[in-house]
Image (tube, rainbow, N blue to C red):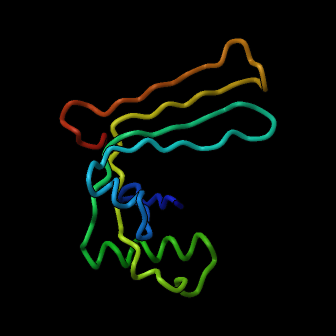
Amino acid sequence: MCPVLTEDGLFAFIVPSPKREDLLRDGRYAMHAFPADDNEDAFSVTGVAEPRTDPTLRKAVAATYLKERDLSAPSPGFDEQQLFEFLIEGCLLTRTTGHGDPAPVHTVWKADATGKRPD
């Protein structure tokens, strides 16, 4: 899965798969980034994913997806992929000085109770 970050949110196109069926059944997700080779820094985001069917939104997110990957056209089967928005409820950033850091620094962010994005 390749996330697409736009000014409007965090999205991904999901191929027909068990992962997509899981998101349709129970939208909860946890997404994380792999650490770099030279340290154990990490980032994760959690929340609920919701399918998005608005054709204008799909076109805009697809344009961002293609531009980020320097593609002129989507790959075969792209139309079968379902667009999801990953609503963010919490994030965790871990910063380290390198492998085996005895005191990693963790920063936690949680959405406010209204679920609205901060301004």
Q: Position of residue 99 (x, y in %)?
A: 78, 25
Residue drawn at 59 percent across, 44 percent down: 33
- Residue found at the far front of this picture: 18
Q: Left or right: 60 with respect to 66? A: left
Q: Is residue 99 above or below residue 70?
A: above
Q: Position of residue 12 (x, y in %)?
A: 43, 62
Q: Left or right: 103 with respect to 109? A: right
Q: From the viewer's side, name the closer residue of 42 and 67.
A: 42
Q: Position of residue 107 (x, y in %)?
A: 51, 24
Q: Left or right: 113 with respect to 45? A: left
- Residue found at the far top of this picture: 102
Residue drawn at 41 percent across, 29 percent down: 109
Q: From the viewer's side, name the closer residue of 64 and 52.
A: 52
Q: Is residue 60 above or below residue 51?
A: below
Q: Position of residue 58 (x, y in %)?
A: 34, 74
Picture quadrant where residue 54 is located: bottom left
Residue drawn at 25 percent across, 72 percent down: 53
Q: Is residue 51 above or below residue 26?
A: below
Residue drawn at 52 percent across, 86 percent down: 76
Which quadrant of the figure contains the C terminus? top left
Label count reads 0
Q: From the viewer's side, name the closer residue of 26 and 32.
A: 26
- Residue found at the far right of this picture: 38
